Amino acid sequence: MKAIMKREPKPGFELVDVAQPKPGPKEILVKVKATSICGTDLHITEWDEWSQNRIKPPLLYGHEFAGEVIELGPGAEGVQVGDFVSAETHIACGQCFQCKTGNSHICENVKILGVDVNGCFAEYAAIPAANAWKNSKKINPKHASAQEPLGNAVHTISYCNVRDANVAIFGMGPIGLCAVQVCKAYGASKVIAVDPSEYRGKMAERNGADLVLNPKADDVVKEVLGATDGHGTDVYIEMSGSPQAITQGFKSLRPGGEVGFLGIPKKPFEFDWAENVVFKGCTVHGVNGRRMWDTWYRTRALLESGKVDLGKIVTHEMRLEDFGRGIELMRKGECGKVVLTP
Ligand SMILES: [Zn+2]
Ligand SMILES: [Zn+2]
């Protein structure tokens, strides 16, 4: 089968022809109908510091997909041949303290699909049956593939009270764009989107943002305060990982506000905790992955009711062979979600 592989510990990728995987014990074999490129895949392709420390080539990468179950491995339960599935990409151990106390999304021994084990940039993927999520067959596979980032947005927002609130979202990558839609769906009164890319600013508008700010042109903190009667936002959703954006996000948050923090800064940076967190009396929620399976049920409800439309996030559809072109678009920030069909 065709697949995208990181064969050597160096920048780049290879389109390879490898044997179709066999589903092992408690695994299922999925025929991939659509798979999408995530920021993580850009890191793996570019071979940044994080990848060098984490990835052990050779690896078939990719973790977002939707496809049909075509074979069950020995002892695989809860899924049938013919089911239309996507996957929770965090493979939890089921045995550690977090797993045993209902917090398997922060499992101590987590393995990630397409990061620690072979993933789905391929015609077929073998995944643990326990990680499969049955999709409604009504959902377009190209949209179903992008549920994982939507789940990140839903999970982040679930810690904050956005109803009738003023919310600023920093970072308009696909997860930030999903967050705009989710905040509107949950009844936020004003959603302010911040991103330095003009392309992504336009996408934010299309996804329902009430105000779009560009830190290259606007005085972000001043504009946010102006748009919130001088008080600042009730909620700050961090999806950028940029130290400059993070400082602006906290400065434009009102005292006592809430922060849902998902963005990952590239490295440690200087930050004024006293001014931004302590004296402000705000609450910061660090967010990792998606809750299993609470987040997935909420995500399904948003999709089935039509309150969230992933069609507005998917901007490019191409063949798996065009992976390099998709990565290039991601590098330039000139895309929402890029979906590939094997
Ligand atoms: Zn992803
Ligand atoms: Zn665990």
Image: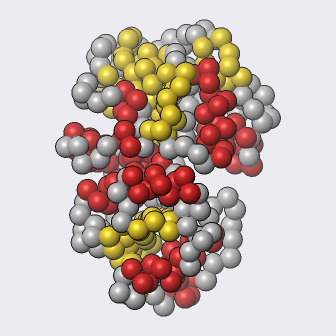
**Residue sitting at x 45%, y 29%:** 65
Quadrant where the image shows the N terminus: top right
Q: Is residue 78 above or below residue 333?
A: above
Residue 259 pos. (x, y %): 43, 71
**Residue sitting at x 40%, y 88%:** 230
Residue 144 shows in the view? yes
Residue 122 pos. (x, y %): 55, 20
Which is nearer the eye, 135 or 240? 240
Residue 282 shows in the view? no
Q: Is residue 84 above or below residue 177?
A: above
Residue 57 pos. (x, y %): 72, 29
Query: Which quarter of the picture shows residue 254?
Result: bottom left
- For the image, the number of numbered tags is 0
56 with respect to 98 (left or right): right
Residue 299 pos. (x, y %): 30, 45
**Residue sitting at x 50%, y 68%:** 213
- Name the colour scheme: secondary structure
Given the current orientation, which residue lies at the most extreme left position?
A: 305
172 with respect to 209 (left or right): right
**Residue sitting at x 50%, y 83%:** 222
Query: Which quarter of the picture shows residue 216?
Result: bottom right
Q: Is residue 109 above or below residue 218?
A: above
